[in-house]
Structures are given as C-alpha cells and as structure tokens.
Image (cartoon, helix red, strand yellow):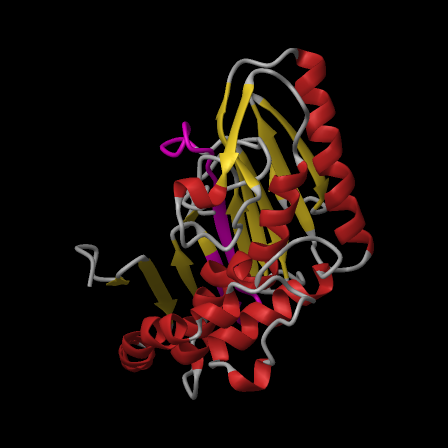
Amino acid sequence: MLPDGRRLHLQHGPIDLVVEAGGQRREVAAAYAQAEARFRRILGELVGELAALRKPCGRGDADPRDLSPTGRRMVRAVRPHAGAFVTPMAAVAGAVADEILAALRKGRRLERAYVNNGGDIALYLQPGARYTVGLATPTEAIRPPASCTISHDMPVRGIATSGRQGRSFSRGIADAVTVLARDGATADAAATLIANAVDIADPAIRREAAESLDPDSDLGKLTVTIAVGPLAAGAVAAALDAGVAAARRMLDRGLIYGAVLLLQGRYRVVGAGSAISPAALERPEALAGAAG
C-alpha cells in the first residue's frame, strides 16, 4: 500500500501499476487481494507469448484462443487496425490495466476504481460516479495542461497516451497523444497509431531502425524517431493535421471517443464532447502520461 493508505502499488519487471478502488472497506480490501493475486501471474504469461504477440496483425498473427486473457485483449484491440503495421504489443499496457481491473472487480461491490499502468488507465464507474484525469505532457507532469472528466454515462473506460517521449518507440513525432476509448487496450492501440501518424518529413527529425536500438523490438527494421529539433509553425501544423486525420477516421468508426494531440507547444482536440477542459482547475485523481 502507498503511504496514503488508499492506493495499491504493484510492480514486477516493466509493469508498474497504481490501483485505487472506492467502496466499503472490506470490499476494497478483498478487491485488492484479487488484483494482487492476478498480478503475480500476468508477466509470466505474457513472456511466454511474446513470439506470438510480436507478429504484425493480419500477417499470420496469433489465434486469440491460444493466448492468455491479457494476450486476447491485446489482439482484439489491434485487429481493427489490420490495414496498418501494428502488433498486439501496441496494446500491452492498456490490456494489462484492463485485466487487473477485471480481477479487482470480480464478485466485488465497488463504487468506482482505476488501474493506472504508467499513464495508461482502465476505469470502472457505478452510476453517478466520475473521475477527473489530468492529461500530462512529459514536460508538464506536475501541472497538467488539461483534464478530462469521465462519468458513468460516457462510453469511456480507458485512457492511454503515446508519443516519442514515452516508454516505447514511436514512428511519429508527437510529444503526446492521449486517447479516450471503451477500454484501456483499445485506447492504447489507438494512441500508438495516432502518435505514429503525427509526422512530417523535415531535416530536424532524426530516425533510426528500431532493431538497431533494441534487437527485440517488434518494429524490426522500421525506423523510429529518436530526436526532433525545433520545427517551423507550418511543419508543426502539418504534422498535427496528419494525426488529426487518423484520429477522425477512428472516431468515425466508433473506435475512440476522443483524442488530444500535442506537438511543440501546440495541441488539437478531436471528439471528446465537453469531457476535456483546457486547464485542470481541480486536482486530478489520476494522471495520464506519455506511457508508450
């Protein structure tokens, strides 16, 4: 338990979760025990499935029936994007958050709960409940430049952020792209692909093959962004326009509820209704960051 006595911290290898549930004390304690029990097995399952989960979607990818529950969540999240190069690993952080949330909730009566996996978040809300989530860029994590309020009646139970300054490689140049969707895995996959789409050809951008930086990367010989110098205003606008177009296509297909795209001090919002406000006027209860 973290010092505040409310939140549970679970960490194993690259997985680092903060979990909080609301409800009667006995229900919350039982929920935390369930989440911890499931967490103890999840990394071992994924390691055993890595070869299958690193295969591009639509190119001899894994049969979900052969995978763990988390692996199945990952495959389901990326299959709607089979026309692009994407592997189930694009959804791993969100899928882990979803899986632990499911374990947390099983048989329990909770008012609300979240699982935050390094900035990729899965939510549960009873009628009348809501969460305020701060949207943090890598350089403004202490004071989020925006927040979103998620209520029970909204079709949003997952929030994920991707970008070149996150934990994973990005093929685009976005500082951060945060997506609201029906679950964490869906949001994670969409954020990855929208962040990849925020891009432009410019000499200020440096790229290298992913495998030269990490021989185990699922991106192989594809290039990833390693540095972005100052860009002209027109270049920033063009890169954001490309990302907005990708986000709108996903919005039109019902894959996402909304997205926020940030690049060098400029941002665009796609969809999201009135959920996203330009400034966090109240202390956020969770923080969505550039998680990869």
Residue 271 place in picture, x, y as percent: 74, 45
Residue lying furthest left in this view?
3
Indicate yes or no whether the magenta region holds residue 131.
yes
Q: Is residue 193 left or right of residue 130?
A: right
Residue 89 place in picture, x, y as percent: 51, 60
Indicate yes or no whether the magenta region holds residue 71.
no
Residue visible at 68% across and 39% down? Answer: 197
Closest to the observer: 46 or 150?
A: 46
- Residue 43 falls in image quadrant: bottom left
- Asked if 40 appears above or below 250 in the picture, the reply is below
Residue 126 place in picture, x, y as percent: 53, 72
Identify the image quadrant of the N terminus.
bottom left
- Asked if 220 appears above or below 267 in the picture, the reply is below
Query: Visible in this render: residue 112?
Result: no
Closest to the observer: 148 or 177?
A: 177
Residue visible at 69% across and 67% down? Answer: 58
Q: Which residues are magenta?
A: 121-143
Query: Visible in this render: residue 174?
Result: yes
Residue visible at 39% across and 46% down? Answer: 214
Tag count in the figure? 0
Q: Is residue 287 left or right of residue 65?
A: left
Residue visible at 69% across and 44% down? Answer: 274
Residue 131 place in picture, x, y as percent: 50, 55
